[in-house]
Amino acid sequence: MLSAGLPHGTVPKLERPGPLRERVYEALLELITTRGLRPGQHLVESELAGHLGVSRQPVREALQRLNTEGWVDLRPAQGAFVHEPTEEEADQLLSVRTLLEAEAARLAAALSDPAGIADLEELCARGERAVDDDDVDLAVATNAAFHARVMAMASNVVLAELAAQVDRRVRWYYTPVARQRGRQSWIEHRELIAAITAHDEAAAVAVMRAHTEHTRSTYHHRDHN
């Protein structure tokens, strides 16, 4: 039940302006990605509609779209449930992520500029503070922002578009292991910044490959409680 999984006030009611169908979809996808709605959780249309302050129709449409995209499972006579990713699904996604991120790191090292380096340094400091404060949500968001900045520094539109397609699922898989990865993840980010700053393409690729592999391995060995 939604009421059992989300503390009161977690889901703000949506403002009316704008395409409501899209806003409901985005709100539900964000809750799934951040695990406000957890894998396997039963999604009751009336409860979701009440929390979001909308009618059931846009919720139903959003759930159908999320089902098509693999975020939600619609089971006959049972209803909608947040999809529970298999280990194989996670492994395939995270392996693809490694390929994309390694190429982004190589290009970022080749094309690095002071402004980009400064942004990476600031994001790394923010991520380290989040770890120190045990702020998992901020750590996850900052991790995503850090990788997005590396991708932007690569200046490859096609690569960025491909990365955007897997970004939300990467966040979905990273969230349950963010605390376990902790400061080590940001130590690896510091190593990546050093390689990019030095324009060392080979080192940047090696660091990024090891970094993403550590996340993949941690996911497979995570605490399932």
Image (spheres, rainbow, N blue to C red):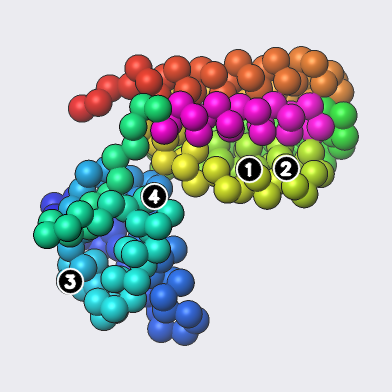
Answer yes or no: is residue 129 visible: no
Mark 4 sits on what residue?
A: 70
Question: In this rendering, which labeled residue sits more in front, label 4 or label 2?
Answer: 4
- Estimate the spatial distance between the alpha carbons at disc 3 and disc 2, rounded to whole Å: 40 Å
From the image, give the main secondary structure of the stretch colored magenta.
helix
Residue 68 occupies quadrant: bottom left
Q: Are marks 3 and 4 in contact (CB under 8 Å)?
A: no
The residue labelled by disc 2 is 159
Residue occupying the far bottom of the picture: 17
Q: Amino acid at mark 1?
A: Ala
Q: Between residues 81 and 148, which one lies in front from this camera angle?
A: 81
Q: Does residue 222 appear to the left or right of 75 in the view shown?
A: right
Image marks 3 and 1: residues in contact by CB distance under 8 Å:
no
Q: Amino acid at mark 2?
A: Leu
Which mark is first along the chain, 2 or 3? 3
**Upstream in sequence: badge 3 or badge 4:** 3
Q: Which quadrant is the N terminus positioned in? A: bottom left
In the picture, the disc for residue 46 is 3
Q: In which quadrant will I find the C terminus?
A: top left
Residue pointed to by mark 1? 163
Labels 1 & 2 near each other (Cβ < 8 A): yes
Identified at 49% across, 38% down, the residue is: 170
Say which of marks 4 and 1 sits in front.
4
Q: Which residues are magenta?
A: 89-108
Q: Which of the two marks, 3 or 2, is nearer to us in this view?
A: 2
Say whether residue 195 is visible. yes
Q: Secondary structure at mark 1?
A: helix
* Secondary structure at numbered mark 4: loop
